[in-house]
Image (cartoon, rainbow, N blue to C red):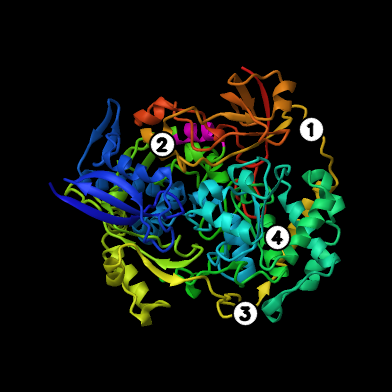
């Protein structure tokens, strides 16, 4: 019997927990947390077993397939590449480059092959119609970083290992273990914060994190920006503002003070549901703490004032002297640095054809996808490429997108499954699974709460018939450019090694070989102050009041003039929720992750259930302007009255899907209720939080 031990970082979510995998005769026999991993220190969540399940999944594609009238048939890679290039070039010849659309799913950023080589493939198509999960998730973070700090990926991270006061809005890190804050084992970190001080959670749901926090406050969905504005206003009114060592490196403080003056705690308390007294008290506690940090994530970025929320989170940290300081909001010093001066990002270089959404960092918002496919005229999308994405379940109004994809002239998907989206493809090109590839977490090491570096070698060799993701993108780029394409390096390992040796730790001897020699990872120490040297703005100053954000205050000011009266037709507000054994829709084909009680339920407060005559476990109909779904009700006091919740990523009952386990636990899709036109107008990010709905007995 041949037994070996394999170390790697789990790449199924942002936490990148270190794993020790025991393999016997080329079969996984155990997966456990790696206590020697300097970032996760032995922490592991239930999702880790899905690496084995994905590898062994009989539904996973390993060879290219072509859709025919009689079903799917396997074809050779040569046939597949030829069909893809021929199909795309025909659409370009008939309709122009704008007739091709591209959608990039979240898993791309979790694999360094895709992260490093997908951009070359996209440039080979040269379409303005590129979309990604970014604008269904974190686009406000990037846009605000671009305006304030001069670089779209220069994102501050909460220094949770040293803070003594943490204010959490629209996030559930006890379940996610951080998002845009790689913090595996957050539960232990949170308890340590509480030993030093306090954790407060602001959320329309009494979430898993809220139940363990020192304090929780319900907030009306979509009003987080008003709460934060009142807190910033309080800082000025109480003369609590202090920029610390960044005072000489910041600008527009006076303009900011004037702009927030009318957003007093009293002015916003009715709309937010949080009393003026509590707003002032929490602000005071934040100021008085030895160190403090405000952290806001999905719930604040995916709402109609997402960019304002992220700006104000940054301001709360900046104006209290808790920025670029131990225990506050800090920046990493990554071994492989992706925050480069020549890649600061660009915005508004073109607009979408139908609604005129501005381009952000090379992409248009997913809110524009359906109308760009269905509205006739020059530039209408006729062909579509997806990579590791399932937008039918993850972007607004999935039912309409489902129909739009079915009407395309041509579609190709790079994916391991025939799912709700890829079932419409003419050709599917499957890359290797996680255990068959090496990996370096290019993005999430840059967002980690501690500076570390780790390289994961492949656990299993791919078969001669399989292709890695980067090999697929390289070959397509070569063919689309008629052979006139040469990547910077043939393999991603080479790119990582070069970046490590020329990066901040290269002079200490850090290299790819060193990481291979230390498979649990290398500890590079806690986060350190890096400002003002790392600022990317032209004048080397933090812009506290970017013009676009100041102007957007006029839009939110209109909310102050509105009442909290209920919409008679859609009286409830819908929010999503994150679940520990789930991240994206493709994890639902693991029996171990979906077993147990039904998790795709509608959470509703007892008062609302009584008002609409709803009983526990009853099938109810939830309606919005986009559509209707039937779902079981789960009556919980954890919901704020007037607010209901459905988890994301479900909805596997559609025909044509080839994922047996997922179809046996289908649930329903929250995005059959969300609206393409409901966006943060400033960033273009989809607004999933606060969708007006009605609930009635089924």
User: In this rendering, which labeled residue sits more in front, label 3 or label 2?
Assistant: 2
Q: Which mark is residue 593?
A: 2
Q: Badge 3 local density, few (<14 within 10 Å), some, or many (20+)?
A: some
Looking at marks 4 and 2 on the same chain, the residue that comes earlier in the sequence is marked by 4
Q: Position of residue 621 (x, y in %)?
A: 61, 22
Q: Position of residue 210 (x, y in %)?
A: 63, 45
User: In this rendering, which labeled residue sits more in front, label 1 or label 2?
Assistant: 2
Q: Position of residue 59 (x, y in %)?
A: 30, 34
In three-dimensional space, the C-alpha distance between marks 3 and 2, rounded to whole angstroms, equals 48 Å
Q: Quick check: can you spot residue 365? A: no
Looking at marks 1 and 4 on the same chain, the residue that comes earlier in the sequence is marked by 4
- Helix, strand or loop status at disc 4: helix
User: Are the residues at dot 3 and dot 2 in contact (C-beta closer than 8 Å)?
Assistant: no
Specify start and end residues of the magenta stretch as a single range: 397-405
- Helix, strand or loop status at disc 1: loop
Q: Badge 1 local density, few (<14 within 10 Å), some, or many (20+)?
A: few
Q: Which residue is mark 3?
A: 540
162 left or right of 469 in image: right
Q: Nearer the viewer, residue 164 or 116?
A: 164
In three-dimensional space, the C-alpha distance between marks 1 and 3, rounded to whole angstroms, equals 47 Å
390 left or right of 311 in image: left
Q: Which mark is residue 566?
A: 1
Q: Nearer the viewer, residue 614 or 677?
A: 614
Q: Which residue is mark 4?
A: 312
- Give the residue displayed 28% in from the left and 43% down from the top: 55
Q: Badge 2 local density, few (<14 within 10 Å), some, or many (20+)?
A: some
């Amino acid at each position: 019997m041949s037994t070996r031990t394999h170390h790697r970082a789990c790449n199924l979510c942002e936490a990148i927990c270190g794993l020790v995998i025991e393999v016997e005769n080329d079969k996984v026999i155990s997966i456990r947390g790696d206590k020697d991993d300097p970032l996760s220190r032995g922490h592991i969540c239930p999702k880790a077993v899905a690496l084995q399940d994905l590898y062994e999944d009989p539904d996973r594609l390993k060879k290219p397939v072509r859709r025919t009238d009689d079903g799917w048939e396997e074809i050779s890679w040569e046939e597949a590449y030829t069909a893809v290039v021929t199909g795309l070039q025909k659409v370009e010849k008939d309709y122009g480059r704008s007739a091709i659309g591209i959608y990039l799913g979240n898993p791309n950023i979790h694999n360094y092959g895709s992260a490093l080589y997908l951009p070359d493939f996209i440039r080979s198509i040269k379409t303005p119609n590129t979309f990604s999960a970014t604008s269904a998730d974190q686009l406000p973070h990037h846009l605000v970083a671009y305006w304030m700090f001069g670089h779209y990926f220069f994102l501050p991270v909460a220094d949770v290992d040293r803070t003594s006061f943490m204010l959490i809005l629209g996030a559930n890190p006890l379940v996610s273990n951080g998002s845009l804050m790689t913090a595996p084992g957050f539960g232990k970190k949170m308890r340590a914060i509480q030993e030093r001080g306090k954790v407060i959670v602001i959320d329309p749901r009494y979430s898993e994190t809220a139940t363990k926090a020192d304090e929780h406050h319900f907030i009306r969905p979509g009003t987080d920006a008003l709460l934060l504005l009142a807190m910033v206003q309080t800082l000025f009114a109480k003369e609590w503002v202090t920029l610390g060592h960044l005072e000489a490196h910041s600008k527009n403080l006076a303009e900011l003070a004037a702009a927030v003056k009318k957003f007093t705690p009293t002015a916003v308390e009715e709309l937010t549901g949080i009393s003026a007294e509590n707003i002032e008290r929490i602000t005071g506690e934040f100021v008085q703490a030895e160190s403090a940090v405000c952290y806001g994530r999905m719930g604040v970025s995916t709402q109609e004032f997402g960019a304002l929320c992220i700006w104000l989170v940054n301001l709360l940290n900046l104006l209290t002297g808790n920025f670029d300081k131990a225990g506050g909001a800090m920046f990493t010093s990554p071994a492989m640095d992706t925050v480069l001066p020549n890649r600061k990002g660009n915005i508004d270089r073109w607009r979408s054809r139908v609604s005129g959404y501005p381009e952000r960092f090379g992409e248009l918002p997913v809110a524009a996808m359906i109308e760009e496919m269905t509205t006739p005229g020059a530039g209408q999308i006729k062909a579509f490429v997806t990579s590791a994405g399932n937008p039918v379940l993850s972007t607004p109004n999935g039912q309409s997108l489902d129909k739009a994809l079915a009407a395309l002239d041509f579609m190709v998907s790079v994916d391991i499954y025939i799912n709700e989206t890829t079932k419409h493809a003419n050709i599917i090109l499957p890359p290797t699974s996680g255990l068959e590839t090496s990996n370096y977490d290019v993005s999430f090491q840059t967002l980690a709460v501690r500076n570390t570096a780790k390289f994961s070698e492949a656990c299993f060799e791919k078969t001669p018939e399989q292709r890695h993701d980067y090999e697929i993108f390289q070959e397509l780029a070569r063919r689309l450019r008629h052979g006139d394409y040469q990547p910077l390096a043939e393999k991603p390992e080479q790119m990582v090694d070069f970046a490590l040796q020329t990066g901040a730790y290269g002079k200490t001897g850090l290299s790819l070989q060193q990481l291979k020699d230390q498979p649990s990872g290398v500890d590079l120490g806690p986060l350190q102050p890096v400002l003002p040297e790392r600022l990317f703005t032209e004048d080397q100053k933090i812009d506290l009041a970017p013009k676009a954000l100041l102007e957007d205050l006029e839009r939110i000011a209109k909310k102050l003039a509105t009442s909290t009266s209920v919409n008679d037709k859609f009286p409830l507000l819908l929010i999503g929720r994150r679940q520990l054994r789930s991240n994206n829709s493709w994890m639902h084909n693991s029996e171990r992750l979906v077993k147990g009680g039904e998790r795709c339920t509608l959470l509703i407060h007892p008062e609302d259930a009584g008002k609409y005559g709803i009983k526990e476990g009853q099938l109810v109909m939830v309606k919005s302007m986009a559509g209707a779904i039937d779902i079981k009700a789960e009556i919980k006091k954890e919901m704020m009255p007037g607010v209901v919740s459905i988890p994301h990523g479900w909805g596997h009952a559609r025909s044509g899907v080839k994922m047996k386990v997922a179809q046996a636990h289908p649930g329903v899709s929250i995005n059959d209720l969300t609206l393409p036109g409901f966006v943060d107008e400033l960033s273009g990010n989809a607004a999933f939080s606060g969708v007006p709905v009605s609930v009635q007995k089924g």
